[in-house]
Amino acid sequence: MLKTELTAIDKRLAELEKLIQAAYEDKVMGRIPEGVCINLLNKYETERAEKLERKKELSAKLAASEANEKSVDDWLDMIRDYAQLEELDRATLVRLIQKIEIGEKREADGHVERDINIYYNFVGFVEL
């Protein structure tokens, strides 16, 4: 969807360039009055600025989305490598896990509990 909108914006920007050029040429050739030309050019320039701003926003979103997809793909590839893992060594732990947070002790139903949150590389915290 982002790519489709970006393509449409690029197409419209090209159209606007042609319209700006045509309005200027029509003014020079005397086919339209100067006031009409100025109004058209202002309208086209306003739309062009809006389209460029929207293109910038969409490009940033698309780049973030693609980076996120790559991170997930990298994580899945890494997890596949360790699917049959029988022993966890330090090197594997460092590759898989970004950080581990251990919460405060608390008593619940007569026994001591604490929260342990594991943040994985590439995907962050996964609540189970």
Image (cartoon, grey):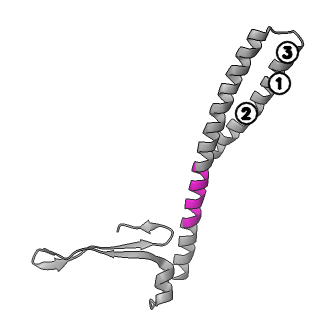
Residue occupying the point 22% across, 74% down: 104
In three-dimensional space, the C-alpha distance between marks 2 and 3, rounded to whole angstroms, equals: 20 Å
Q: Secondary structure at mark 3?
A: helix
Res. 36 image quadrant:
top right
Q: Secondary structure at mark 1?
A: helix
* Magenta range: 61-71
The 10 Å Cα crowd at callout 3, few under 14, some 14 to 19, many 20 or more, is: some
Of the numbered discs 1 and 3, the one sitting upstream in the chain is 1
Q: Nearer the viewer, mark 2 or mark 3?
A: 3
- The residue tagged 2 is 13
Residue 42 placed where, x, y %?
Answer: 69, 20
Q: Nearer the viewer, mark 1 or mark 2?
A: 1
In screen coordinates, is 123 left or right of 39?
A: left
* Residue 94 highlighted magenta (yes or no): no
The numbered dot on residue 21 is 1
State the residue in front, 41 or 85. Answer: 41
State the residue in front, 77 or 118. Answer: 118
User: Is residue 1 something one can see in this rendering?
Assistant: no
Above or below, 106 against 30 in this view is: below
Res. 21 image quadrant:
top right
Residue at far left of view: 110
The numbered dot on residue 26 is 3
Res. 67 image quadrant:
bottom right
**Which amino acid is tagged 3?**
Asp
The 10 Å Cα crowd at callout 1, few under 14, some 14 to 19, many 20 or more, is: few
* Residue 69 highlighted magenta (yes or no): yes
Of the numbered discs 1 and 2, the one sitting upstream in the chain is 2
